Image (tube, rainbow, N blue to C red):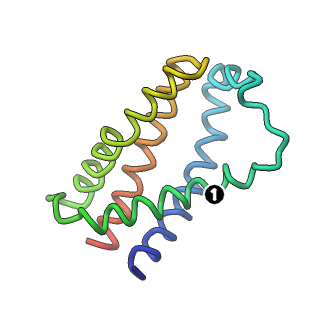
């Protein structure tokens, strides 16, 4: 369990930095995507903002546990193992969640696709980190 916590914490810190930096880069280079968020569905009073920032750690700890349980199924060099891990997570978890989200909320396919690829990117980065430090 100590290994799961350690790798989850390391991945969480890295994902937090990458995700936060990616947010600024996306706003700079794809601002039209963020215009879609001018929707009452996404307005918050700020009381739960900390939950948004903790997301990188929540997903990292969950993926770290998943990695520890199933790492023997992923073969090859660490980059390939990380990529395969991210793809498995995206197909098994993200795709169904994005499907139900799109079908039940008044949001665009572009928005859902951006969430899907963001989650895939996070899982691949976490998988590469796990494959490197916890083979």
Position of residue 120 relative to residue 95, above or below, is: below
Residue visible at 45% across and 48% down in the picture: 122
* Horizontal relation, residue 14 to residue 130: left or right: right
Quadrant location of the C terminus in the rendered image: bottom left
Tell which of 30 and 40 is nearer to you: 40
| Local SS, label 1 | helix
Residue placed under numbered mark 1 in the picture:
54
Tell which residue pokes out farthest to the right in this image: 45
* Horizontal relation, residue 50 to residue 126: left or right: right
List x then y, in percent, for residue 85: 28, 52
Residue visible at 44% across and 60% down in the picture: 62
Residue visible at 41% across and 57% down in the picture: 126
- How many residues crowd mark 1 within 10 Å: few (<14), some (14–19), many (20+)? few
* Horizontal relation, residue 96 to residue 50: left or right: left
Tell which residue pokes out farthest to the bottom in this image: 2
Q: How many marks?
A: 1
List x then y, in percent, for residue 70: 24, 62
Position of residue 23 relative to residue 131, above or below, is: above
Q: Quadrant of residue 90?
A: top left
Q: Quadrant of residue 133?
A: bottom left
Quadrant location of the N terminus in the rendered image: bottom left
* Horizontal relation, residue 34 to residue 92: left or right: right
Position of residue 3 relative to residue 99, above or below, is: below
List x then y, in percent, for residue 96: 38, 33
List x then y, in percent, for residue 125: 41, 53
Residue visible at 45% across and 31% down in the picture: 98
Position of residue 85 relative to residue 105, above or below, is: below
């Amino acid at each position: 369990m100590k290994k799961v916590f350690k790798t989850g914490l390391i991945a969480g810190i890295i994902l937090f930095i990458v995700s936060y930096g990616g947010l600024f880069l996306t706003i700079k280079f794809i601002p039209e995507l963020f215009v879609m968020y001018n929707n009452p569905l996404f307005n918050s009073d700020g009381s739960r903002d900390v939950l948004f920032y903790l997301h990188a750690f929540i997903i990292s700890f969950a993926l770290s546990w998943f990695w520890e349980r199933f790492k023997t199924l992923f073969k090859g060099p660490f980059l390939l193992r990380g990529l395969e891990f991210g793809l498995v997570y995206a197909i098994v978890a993200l795709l169904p969640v994005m499907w139900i989200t799109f079908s039940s909320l008044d949001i665009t396919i572009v928005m859902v696709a951006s969430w899907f690829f963001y989650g895939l990117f996070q899982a691949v980065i976490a998988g590469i980190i796990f494959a490197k430090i916890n083979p």
